[in-house]
Image (cartoon, rainbow, N blue to C red):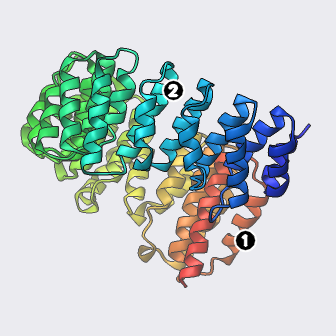
Amino acid sequence: MIDEIEVLKEEEDIKELTRILQEGDKKRRADAAKALGMMRFKEERDDVSSALVERLKKDDEATVRANSALALGHLKSRTGKKALKEAAKDDDWEVRHDAAIAMGEFEDEDFLETLYSLLDDPENEVKRKSIEALGKIGNSINGSKSAEIISKLDVLLDDRELKEEAVKAVSQFDTDKALDTLSKVYKKSEREIREIAVNGVATIEGEKANNILLEALEDDSWRVREDAAKILGKREVEKAVEPLVERLNDKKNYVVQEALRSLGNIGSKNEEILKMIEEKIRDDDPGTRMAAAESLEKLDGEVSSKILFERIELEQNPRVLWSISDSLSEISKEHLKDLKKDMEDLIESRKPFAVAAMGKAGFSSYLEDILSMLDDERWKVRQKAAEALSGMDPADLSKRRAEKMLKKLSKMMEDNDKWVRAESIKSLGDLIFDLDRKIETDEFKKELVRKARVEADDDVKEAIKQARNLLDLYQRER
């Protein structure tokens, strides 16, 4: 049986939901409050806010009061702010708990004093939600109030029950005071807390934050080292290169892998570093070999392209081979063009990996090879061939070749493997977009529309949606 409240929510019958909130039995009142909180109004509805405030203040059932508080928070009801502050004194802890959550939704410093008072609540669950709310508010304000909140949270850093929530909340502040707190916490806390502190430091810019991250590369916990390596790469901290190179000898593969990716992000093309990365692409661990390929892709040079190409000849793991193929396809064409003469020397079992890479990189001379890969009995080969076709440069294609490619992709929308269908649809959408001024594409647009009506798989339907959105955008721009 379909739930009545759910139906009313879908129909956006505000009047009936409001009536049930006031007159229904306790379960229906609670469900109506929850449903009203999920509504999305362009501006505040006084009738809804007033009804929720009334339930929050007067309802005999704690669940109804709690749901009303949450609803006022979701709706960010200005009318409900005073009632939420009063709800912080409710006799039922679940109402105080949900009122704290609601106040955090506003991200408004007007709730600070009320939330400070809840830090002394007898229930730890209420304290936790108050701490989270203070973190949300702190993320949206600056100045003295920000420092004031951190000072309130500092007191909780010695509380074993609440320390984790307090550190997470401080991590949302982008201030020097927050960094001082996180640095202090990092130096004297257990592993789980150090992880949170390091990720909090990641949100704060500056040399002081970078130094904490560099220190974390030497942490006793491999999880902390892994996070630090990843963050330093994302921040492209150049002075992290040498410490990251040292992490290439870490005992934990996950740390080695993040160090490799980060060295690629930072972009050091030092000859010795390249040799170390090349060594890792021959590592016993498949994940490490894949991370080395990703690093070489980002370093994007003649040496990188040769290492990756040679690895296609030697690698035995298909998953790693496709990863190397993907990385090779991201190398600049100017570095890849010299590899074309070596393609013929590859053994047949390795050619699909190299062909897919060159096609995805934009070399239209491999079009026929890629089209033949679409008939391969292996679904992964067909999927990668479909993906590679999206890299074709329309300027390099004759009308005949372009039409042949679109017809083949259109046919692949009926493949028995959903991932082949999805990738074919994505490439078809991209190529229709690129070729629309060059050839007649209405036939293929109609095929996408037809496919949308009959496709059952959610992943493929999402690919169709993306393709059609792209083409709708193109039409609007015209």
Q: Identify which amino acid the numbered label 2 is placed on.
A: Val
- Assess disc 1: are there few (<14), some (14-19) or many (≥20) residues with their C-alpha within 10 Å of its C-alpha: few
- 366 w.r.t. 201: above or below: below
Give residue 50's mark: none
- 472 w.r.t. 18: above or below: below
The residue most toward the right is: 1
Residue at (36% x, 34% y) in the render: 169
- Where residue 66 sits, quadrant-wise, is top right
In the picture of the structure, the residue carrying the numbered disc 1 is 446
In the picture of the structure, the residue carrying the numbered disc 2 is 126
How far from the left and from the top, in percent, is residue 148? 27, 40
How far from the left and from the top, in percent, is residue 63? 71, 30
- Where residue 155 sits, quadrant-wise, is top left
- 385 w.r.t. 185: above or below: below
Residue at (46% x, 26% y) in the render: 127
| 267 to the left or right of 76 | left
